[in-house]
Structures are given as structure tokens and as C-alpha cells.
Image (spheres, grey):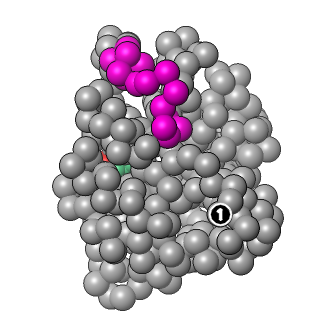
Amino acid sequence: MLEDAFVTRKLIAGNWKMNGSLEANEALLRAVLAGLPAEPAADVAVCVPAPYLAQVQALCQGGPVAWGAQDVSAHERGAFTGEVSAAMLRDFGCRYVIVGHSERRQYHGETDEVVAAKAQRALAAGITPIVCVGETEAQRDAGETELVVKRQLAAVIHALGHCVGEIVVAYEPVWAIGTGRTATPEQAQAVHAVLRAQLRAAVAGQRRVRILYGGSMNAGNAAALLAQPDIDGGLIGGASLKADEFLRIVAAAG
Ligand code: 13P
């Protein structure tokens, strides 16, 4: 396919979630930077808690690891206490921001429409949103996986139009996050193929949108997942906090 010709590299992104400290971040990033080849075979990024963006920017600037945030406000500016705007993330050199992570949908009531608005804000500021979709275990058991992920992605396509070609999508089955229960490569590929078809219909003729898998990805299972035709990288939680584990996942993406 024409758009496949534009696929260059996989993306391995760490999601540190609410973990870290000045001391731990520095040790982790120094170990990752020291362990990466000068030109890694995959794109590498870390999405860190907002207070550490300046630290991570200082440590990673000019190197092979991009950085980003884990959330962004759906509003541009103003009286939204506690929120961080896309322009603020841009000030700290963020290349990526995760939006619609299931933990935000679940614990902070983020709807598909809010997630879409956040993706729009990120893109408007020149930051690539990593839009997360994924079904709960109950939804999978009820046979609703396809319906759920398509609905979640459709809201973003509706808001962004053809600009959806600029985003990264992450398929993260909720039942696989932090549980050690990874989706099998076949289970993940089946959902990625659904998302791929939906994206192709929305961005025909444009470059291929990267679709990452997330959910208990580690050094042991990464290669098999990343070998699937529609898995273009990983969004890594727990394993991104261990430099050797993270580096082995990056190596598996080459
Ligand atoms: P784990 O890799 O810890 O399962 O987390 C996945 C995730 O939620 C990444 O965003």
C-alpha cells in the first residue's frame, strides 16, 4: 500500500505514570542514554510527570530520547486550577503527550469528547498526541472490544478530520495494564487491524499512523508483539522504569 511506504520506524514510549523523583529520574535517564546506540533502530520517548519536564528536557536535549507529558488540558488557557496547557508543554520541548489513558478515563471521568478535545489542543501546539483506546475485561467478555475501540477512535477522527494522520494511537486493553496479563500477539494484532482499517478510511492517501500496543509489555514479550504487521511500537508502563528492561524493548523494536 502507498501509505505503508511512509512507515519508517517503530516508536517505543515509556509512560512513567506517577512514579519518579529527581534522583531516580536522573539515574534512569542516564542509564537509558548510556545504553542506547547513537542511532537507535526505533524512536524512543519517555512521558513523565509534569513537574519533571524541565529536568527531563535538560537531560535529554539533543539526544536520541524524546520526551512528553501524560495529560494535557482540553482548554487553551485560563481559570482551570491544576491544569497544564498544551502551550506550557510546548515551552518544555514536549514532542508527545498521552491523552485518554484508561486511568484518566476511569479515575477522572474523561469522555471520548474530552479526549478528542485534548488531542486537538496538543496538535494545535505542535505536539503529537498519543491517543489511548482499549476495552475493559467486561467489555471483552461481552464481545464489545471492536465496538468500544472504534467508538473511542471515532470521536478523535470526528474532531480532527484528516489531521488524525498526525496522531499516534495506542491500543491498551485495560485488563492488560499493570496486571502482567499481556494480550497475545494475535489478540493485539486483531484489534490493531480494526484500528488500522478505521484510520485508513479516515486518512486515505496520507502516511501510516503509528499504532502502539500497551499493557504489560516487557523485554520477554516485546519481540513477538512488535513482529505483528500492525503493531508499530509500544507504550510501556512498569517496564519503562527499569533501564535494562526498557533498553531491551527498544532493541526488540529494531
Ligand atoms: P504496564 O506496562 O505497566 O502494564 O502499563 C501499560 C500502560 O498503561 C502504558 O500506558
Quick check: is 40 in the magenta stretch?
A: yes
How far from the left and from the top, in percent, is residue 246?
A: 32, 35
Q: Is mark 1 within 8 Å of ligand 1?
A: no
Residue located 35% across and 21% down the image: 35
Quick one: 177 or 240, which is closer to the camera?
A: 240
Q: Is residue 193 left or right of residue 116?
A: left
Q: Is residue 146 left or right of residue 83?
A: left
The amino acid type found where label 1 is placed reads: Asp
- Which quadrant of the figure contains the C terminus? top left
Region of the chain picked out in magenta, as a range? 30-44
Whether residue 197 is situated above or below residue 206 in the rendered picture: below
How far from the left and from the top, in percent, is residue 67?
A: 54, 29
Quick check: is 223 in the magenta stretch?
A: no
Quick one: 36 or 150, which is closer to the camera?
A: 36
Q: Residues within 10 Å of mark 1 (few under 14, many from 20)?
A: few
Residue located 77% across and 38% down the image: 125
- Which quadrant of the figure contains the N terminus? bottom right
Residue located 49% across and 40% down the image: 42
How far from the left and from the top, in percent, is residue 38?
A: 49, 21
Q: Which residue is mark 1?
A: 4
